Amino acid sequence: MADQVTEAVVRGEVSAAVGTPALAVAIRRFALGRILYPPSRLWPNNPSYGIVVDREFLEREEAAVERFLVMHEDATSLIRNNPRLAARIISEHVGFIDDDFVMETLKCPQILRPITGRFIASTWNL
């Protein structure tokens, strides 16, 4: 879907889009777009991601959820401590983006922001 939005912006079919940091980088890179309204003003305290599981799944798959959270923390630590290596790994895995694209995406202040109580409170009714 994000690639279709980027293509629509490039073709002039869409004038603006709202999306992830990667979409912002793609539009900036391929359509010479720019951020008009930063995420910090649109939804303060949003860390740009969330991990959500329902109670039944958590009870049924507790070990899998725990393994996922450990792996998530390891990946986040790698991004935080060695972003160049992380960018290379990500770009090689995806296959059609380069390290610089990933590095630009990782520079988004929301990418590594921890989930705060304020964020949880702002999403409670979603």
Image: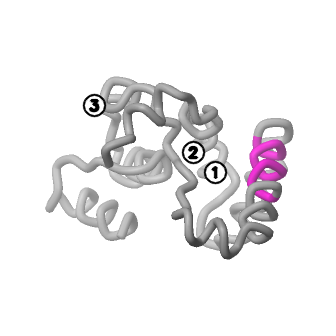
Residue 113 location (% of width, % of height): 61, 32
Alpha-carbon span between mark 3 and mark 1? 21 Å
Residue on which the image places disc 2: 105
Q: Which residue is mark 1?
A: 102
Residue occupying image coordinates x 38% and y 33%:
122
Q: Which mark is residue 78?
A: none
Q: Main secondary structure of the magenta part?
A: helix
Give amino acid for label 2: Thr
Magenta stretch bounds: 71-79
Residue appearing at x 32%, y 70% in the figure: 4
Viewer-proximal residue, 21 or 96?
A: 21
Pick the residue in front: 45 or 10: 45
Which mark is drawn over residue 36? 3
User: Helix, strand or loop at disc 1?
Assistant: helix
Q: Within 10 angstroms of label 1, few (less than 14), some, or many (20 or more) residues?
A: many
Q: Secondary structure at mark 2?
A: helix
Amino acid type indicated by mark 3: Leu
